[in-house]
Image (cartoon, grey):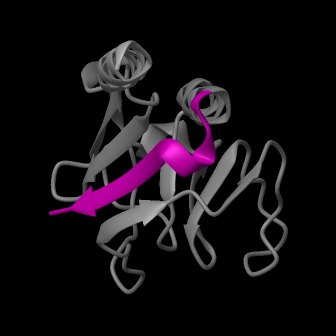
């Protein structure tokens, strides 16, 4: 009986320890297309708000919640003349969050559908996703 009691106590202690362990880290990039802003959350805490450029007229940016499918520190568009897309986080087909050299256009729709960021902000986001894991990161796009 004593062995059964010790076993049960061990199971309860293990269960309580498991329950109190912190949840895995996550990164959420919430893009408000109507405001042309991205808000970045790490472990539920707001960390950054940045200007973005999403799809201009005729080039929509998809809405929804997506996981990061592919990451490329350096990437060149196959569709748009080899345009540089540094620190790319692909979330749906050819759509990505990435850095841009057109920083003067941030804050208004200007892209072919991707989400453009200032190069230093794209690098920060890329590093966060890499550190916490693409599997625990989300790209959320709304109006």
At 38% from the left edge and 86% from the top edge, which residue is drawn?
Answer: 58
Residue 50 falls in which quadrant of the image? top left
Q: Is residue 101 left or right of residue 43?
A: right
| Residue 24 spot, x, y in % from top left | 46, 30
Q: Is residue 41 left or right of residue 110?
A: left
Which residue is more in the foreground, 105 or 26?
Answer: 26
| Residue 20 spot, x, y in % from top left | 30, 17
Which residue is more in the foreground, 46 or 32?
Answer: 46
Q: Quadrant of the C terminus?
A: bottom left
| Residue 34 spot, x, y in % from top left | 16, 58
At 40% from the left edge and 69% from the top edge, which residue is drawn?
Answer: 55
Residue 1 falls in which quadrant of the image? top left
At 51% from the left edge and 50% from the top edge, which residue is drawn?
Answer: 116
Judge whether 17 appears above or below 33 on screen.
above
Judge whether 55 appears above or below 133 on screen.
below
Judge whether 73 appears above or below 72 on screen.
above
Q: Is residue 33 left or right of residue 88?
A: left
**Magenta stretch?**
132-143
Residue 82 falls in which quadrant of the image? bottom right
Magenta stretch contains residue 12? no
Which residue is more in the foreground, 134 or 54?
Answer: 134
| Residue 98 spot, x, y in % from top left | 60, 49
């Amino acid at each position: 009986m004593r062995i059964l009691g010790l076993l049960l106590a061990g199971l309860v202690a293990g269960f309580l320890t498991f329950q109190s362990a912190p949840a895995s880290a996550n990164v959420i990039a919430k893009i408000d297309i109507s405001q042309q802003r991205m808000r970045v959350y790490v472990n539920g805490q707001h960390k950054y708000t940045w200007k973005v450029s999403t799809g201009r007229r005729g080039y929509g940016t998809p809405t929804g919640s997506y996981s990061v499918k592919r990451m490329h520190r350096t990437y060149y568009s196959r569709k748009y003349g080899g345009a540089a897309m540094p620190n790319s986080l692909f979330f749906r087909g050819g759509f990505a969050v990435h850095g841009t050299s057109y920083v003067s256009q941030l804050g208004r729709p200007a892209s072919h559908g991707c989400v453009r960021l200032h190069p230093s902000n794209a690098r920060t986001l890329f590093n966060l996703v890499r550190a916490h894991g693409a599997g625990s990161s989300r790209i959320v796009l709304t109006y």
